[in-house]
Amino acid sequence: MTDTTSDHVIDQLVWSIIKDSENPNDFVSFVRHARDREVDYDAACTLALKHRANVDAKSLFPDVVAKLQERASAGCSSAMLHLGIWHRLGYGVPVDSDKGLAWYKAGMELMDGRCFMGYAIGIMHSDPQTARPLFRRATELGCSVAHGYWADIDKEHYMEHMALAAKDNDPLGVYLYAYELLRRATKEHETEHALDVMKRASKLGSTNASFQLAMMFIHGEYGKRVDKAAAEYWFKKGIRSGSVNCMTGLGIYLTFDVPARLEEGLNLLLRGAVLGDSQAQYFLGKHQMLKGQTKEEQTEGLYWLEKAAEQKHKFVYYLLAENYKHGIGVGADLELAARWAKRGVEIGDADCQCFYGLALIYGEGVEKDPETAHNLFHAAHIQNNDWGTYLLGMSHERGDGVPVDKTKAVEYYREGAKRGDINCAFVLGLAYLLGDGVEGDYPTALKWFKLSADKGSSRAKTYIGLMFLNGSGVQADTETGQKWLLEAAEEGSALAMRELGELHFNGEKVPLNLDLANRWMGKAAVNGDPVAIEWIKKHCPEKPAWLNNLLQTSTKFE
């Protein structure tokens, strides 16, 4: 007689063996195995977190596999099913599709409908003709959810299959049906019906449905208004059923949008990261690297970013390149920075194309190759990457990898500026101010400077200040000019600091004030302005104490 041991009994068996493990991967495998069923996920997550550094500790999962194999040998088709799933998806064992199919086949001999479905899923893309009758047999044996997969190779009856997948209230089957209803909805009542079915799937235990609903409310999709409280409700429902996606989604929201709950958000991201979710690893690493207050936090951020990179998370390569270039949490290493950026280039990441292109321009960690750099900037530009557009204009302006062509440079700057890019708008304003690559036009220069300044460019604010001081394209207005320069200087513009210093030193447009002149020139020198550095050497050979203290904080003043 066939042993029809329930999934719940299998879950209890797995837990009884691994609960004393000190290897975090055992608990990760358990969470993946038991998702969408009622088990103590919190205990598994807590133990995975507790032992996260013990990846080399003895794993007890081989004992689990041996016990299930023992049950399978005694005729337990449920054990065969789970052994098939584990080998096909790599839960606690290396991925081995052939072994997975063999276990499904053993279960098929005992007329287990889910094993028929598992085998059909495993071959449906390589051998759809063989898969079709297997899906049919699975449904005849009571596995209605098989219709949800059968639909993919029977497009003519697609929605009929989806409706049948949901008829027995299988959580996955109801979710698949709801997803298709939502995707195809064109009218409000159709969307509402789809959402009702999605909510039913979530209440039946589908973590995919919980995640879909949470994301819908957090982003205001499908005509729904943004409702963070509703999103949190569905995230938490998914978490209770073992959804790492929901754990990560709620963690991202709390970490980046709710400062008062930062610790809670980081803890959720840490759990998701330990459970192997690349999104959690990326966002946790990004936060720790950029916001970490200690070197230890930044080093931890680097660790999680590299973990995400192991899973080929597409946004992580640029962050790692920046990290190694600037030495955040680790010693600066330009060669390693370039290597990470190159990996991003290989998958077409536009920011990595820009980063690696600049490395090729300046020979930072790689040999100089301006022609390849120009091509990378062009690749980023055609992806509508503003940085790529700006750098492409710069390569034409400076002749990096191509002949100097300032007219073409202006064309790219204008394209980026029209999209609102802060840097393109500034250099376009400068081109019109100087008549460089385009006919000089002060009012147009001011227009683009203003756009750049409104987005926070201290360089643009400096030039607006100078235009008002000098009456370039506007009526001369010392007070307004000084206001713009002060704003830019407070944001760190060394040029604005120097211009304020000269303004007070000359005493033409404002009263002569040598003390203010010295102080602004000193600040400009500290920030590396070469003219200010020479001015300080000439006018303050015997530096007062305040200036000495200021200069001691600078690595740019010699």
Image: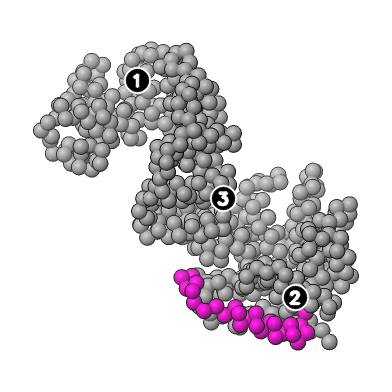
Is 506 rendered above or below residue 361? above
Residues under labels 2 and 3: Cα distance?
Answer: 35 Å
Give the amino acid at mark 3.
Lys
Q: Secondary structure at mark 2?
A: helix
Residue situated in front as seen by the camera: 275 or 467 = 275
Quadrant of the rendering where the N terminus is positioned: bottom right
Counting residues from the N terminus, which is met first, the one under dot 2 or under dot 1?
2
The chosen color scheme is one colour
Q: Which picture quadrant has residue 547?
A: top left
Query: Which circle's residue, 3 or 1, is located before the other in the chain?
Result: 3
- Between residue 419 and residue 393, name the one nearer to us: 393
For the record, the magenta segment spans 51-78
Is residue 548 shown left or right of residue 317?
left
Quadrant location of the C terminus in the rendered image: top left
Can residue 219 be seen at all in this image of the molecule?
Answer: yes
Q: Which mark is residue 314?
A: 3
Residue 103, labelled with which disc? Answer: 2
Query: Quick check: can you spot residue 268?
Result: no
